[in-house]
Structures are given as C-alpha cells and as structure tokens.
Image (spheres, grey):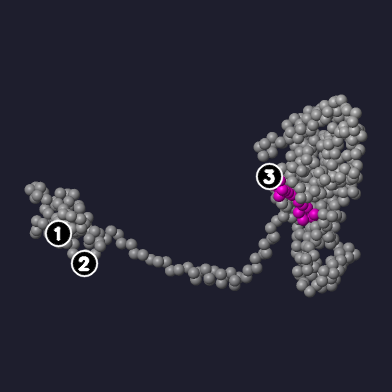
Amino acid sequence: MTSINPEIVVSGGSAYVPSRESRVTSHDSAFVVELSAFSGPLDLLLALIRDEKVDIYDIPIARVAEQFLLRIRTLGLNDAADYLEMAARLLRIKAQMLLPRGEGDDWEDPRAELVRRLLEYQQMREIVDVLEHRADERRRQFARAYLPTEAAPPQAPLALSLSELLSAVDRVLRFVREPNMHEVVARPLDVPAAIDLIRSLLALKARLRWTDVVRADAAPWQVLSALLGLLELARLGELRVAQPRPFANVEISRDPTSEAA
Amino acid sequence: MTPLAKLLEAALFASARPVPLDELAALDAEVSPAALRAALDEIRVHYDSEGHGVELTEIAGGWQVLTRSEYTEAIERAQLAARPQRLSAAALETLAIVAYRQPIGRSEIEDIRGVNVGSILKSLNERGLIDVVGRAEGLGRPLLYGTTPLFLEHFALRHLEELPRADELAIAMRPRLADAPPSADETAADASP
C-alpha cells in the first residue's frame, strides 16, 4: 500500500463523524486545524439551519450569524480563514437586511446568493451520499489484487533457463580482452657515468662542444643523462656552459676558478 | 463452459484491473463483439448458478471477477486482503463536484465547497481518482480536472452516466451557475419572496 495523504482518507466509520469536535494536528510542520466534524463553513451553516429548524429560503440571518460566530468560537476554529470569510459574509448580509427597503420590485434579497450556495452544497452532499454508499458496496468485494493506486503494469516474470544463463556468461567472458602488459623500467638514466665521461673529456681538452659529449646516434636516455650530468657539474662549478646564440652548439670549458683550486 | 468462455475467464483471472471489451477482443481476432458478450454472460451465469465464491461484474467500462460480498469479513479477518481506505468527507465532496461538473477548475470547486481544495485535489490526483484534463481559457489558464477510470472502479460505476441524474436528486441539480435559465430555476424564485 502506498502512503496516502491523511487528509483524504478516514480510517473507519462514516466519513461524516457525528461528534461536533475539532482536532488540532500538526501536519507538514504547518499548523492545520482539522475539522473532523464539518467539512467547511457551508457544512456548519447547514447544520445550524437544521438545528435551529429554520426555513432555508427564509433564514433569520441575525440569529444564524450570531450562532455561527458562537460555534466557530467554541470550536476554536479562529484560524480557519474559510470560516471567518463566511462569518464576514453573514454579517454583511445582516447589515444589508437592516437597510430600508424601497417600494420598487427591484429589491433583491441579500440572502439569495447564500441560499443558492447552500442548496448547491446540499445537492452535492446528496451526491456524496450516493457515492459513499456505492464505495461501501464496492469495498465489500475484493478483486484478484486490489490496487490502491494506478500502478505501472506489472513486469512479466523472468523466464530464464540454466543453459541461457550459462551462454550469457560465455558471451560476457568472450568479450574480456587480454590485459595490455607494459614493462616499467626504474630510472634508466645514468647520470654518474655521464659525469665521469665529461670529467675525463675535460681532462684531455680544456674546451668541449655538446657534440663531443653526446654522439649523433645517442639514445634519448643518453642525451638526458649527459644534459643532467653537464648541469650538475656546472652547479658544482667544475665547468662553464655557454651558447653564443640560440640553437648553436653548446660550448663547455673548464672553470678557471676550479682549476686554480 | 464453451472454449471462448474459458479463454475469457483465464484472461479476466490474469488481470488485476477491469478488462474492457476491446481488450478482450484482442484475445481472439475472429470473435465478434456479440459472441464476446454471450461468452461473458455465460461466465456470469455459470458463477451465479453453480455456486461460486466469485462473481463477474461489469465495472469501469470493463469486466472484473470479484469475490462475493458475504466472504469479505472472513477474508479480512484472515488478513488475506485489506479493504481500501474510506475517503474523507472533504475528499468525497470534492470528487462529487468534479464528477458532475468536469472538466472543472479549482476555483469553481472552492466556490461550491466554500473551502480551499488545493491539497485535496493534489491527493486525489496522486491517488489516481482525478486527473488534469486540460486548461481553461482565460486568466492564468487554470488546470481543469476530470475523473479517471479508477474513480469508476472505486465507486463501482460502469460509466459516468450511471451516477444519479441531476433531476433524480431531491434538490434538482442546476446547470452551471452562469448559464442557469431563470425560468427553470425554482430555487432562486423561492429564495426571493
């Protein structure tokens, strides 16, 4: 069963609760006055007209308005704007009734609109009785599965055999590819060897060129090792590195100060 | 029972909702509507005369197999099935107005009931008893509501025409407020002496 707004369902008994009480409940954090006895101001008004045994076509408006105000006060319905609006309407009609009437035929009973609404409401209540009766009849019968709400059509149950399941597994496995293996080499550079090479070359010649240190067919790791070795030696002050213009051959020379040392 | 009646019985058993005639017709393309009706009648008579615990009911524009009402209490006691919850007075009043005046907008319902009905309309809509059927012309193009097939099911109605006609009610149902002809309007005449 789905959860249903408590406002539109009642748990048992008739929808029209005979007790004349109101309950105050907190609902969705807002303060809501639940009018368990009356479904609205017209309902309360009709109840008053019944209780006072007055003619609906000739409502003693002053008395009914007074009773209405008394009831909404004793019921604690002051929060219900709909009831207050009706109370204001009754008082206005009462005031209009007190106005002196002209002799002409065009006098319109200020109660006419209210009577029309009350009759319309009473008629609607009659339909409610019919509907409620029919719903009660229907509630006495069960369908194969009672669906309280419009549900999506039920999904057809799975029809799956073991061989189908196994062939599905097969299909999945066939699509699993061989993993793409990749060899990882730890630090292929050899900077110390490059430093040794540069030092021994400098011991032979005071001035070197980049192309003396790195041969034309050197592998990238050899180029990088030589570069890092060169920079390291320059940092240590063992040599100087110079380039006369961009992209020119790098010239390497023994540092005169380190030579002195 | 005839083979067609058995086929229909199986189809009705398989469906949780009332099945309309055209859906039953899809079971066998060669069967005429008249033959379908005859077969449905056969099932109904069979259930009634042979002493079955269920009966075939025409409801909400279709046919449905329902348990007989004398077994309701026992089934409910055994907790095999639960009766649907009753609708509150406010919900019933709103539904009644929608049923008779559809398509109808929210403000018109509020005029008749004299209370705000926004949250009730939402709940009834969520419950599938009413649905938005269009928008009115005019300011704000308000939503218009109408009843659903589930409404018919809930109130055991075959179709909307099965609701009591306005002139069958104790207080004659007037047509729409605006276009009520004054001559046919006894109540207004009585109201102004």
Left or right: where does residue A215 sit relative to residue B163?
A: left
Q: Is residue B61 magenta?
A: no
> Outermost residue toward the front?
A104
| Disc 3 to disc 1, C-alpha distance | 87 Å
Q: Which image quarter is the C terminus of chain B in?
A: top right
Q: Which mark is residue A209?
A: 1
The residue indicated by pointer 3 is B140
At x 84% / y 47%, what residue is drawn?
B175
Q: Which mark is residue A217?
A: 2
3 or 1: mark nearer the eye: 3
At x 18% / y 49%, what residue is drawn?
A235
Which amino acid type is marked by label 3?
A: Gly
Left or right: where does residue A251 sit relative to residue A95?
A: left
Nearer the observer, B117 or B143: B143
The answer for which chain carries disc 3 is B
Q: Which image quarter is the N terminus of chain B in?
A: bottom right
Nearer-N-terminus badge (1/2)? 1
Q: Is residue A87 above or below residue A251?
A: above
The image position of residue A171, as x and y in percent, is 53, 71
Q: Is residue B54 visible?
A: no
Q: Which residues are magenta?
A: B135-153
At x 78% / y 60%, what residue is drawn?
B18
| Disc 1 to disc 2, C-alpha distance | 16 Å
The answer for which chain carries disc 2 is A
Q: For residue A216, what is the image quadrant? A: bottom left
Within 10 Å of the Cα at label 2, are there few (<14), some (14-19), or many (20+) other Cα atoms? few
Within 10 Å of the Cα at label 1, are there few (<14), some (14-19), or many (20+) other Cα atoms? some
Which amino acid type is marked by label 2?
A: Asp
Which amino acid type is marked by label 1?
A: Arg
At x 9% / y 56%, what residue is drawn?
A206
Q: Is residue B146 magenta?
A: yes
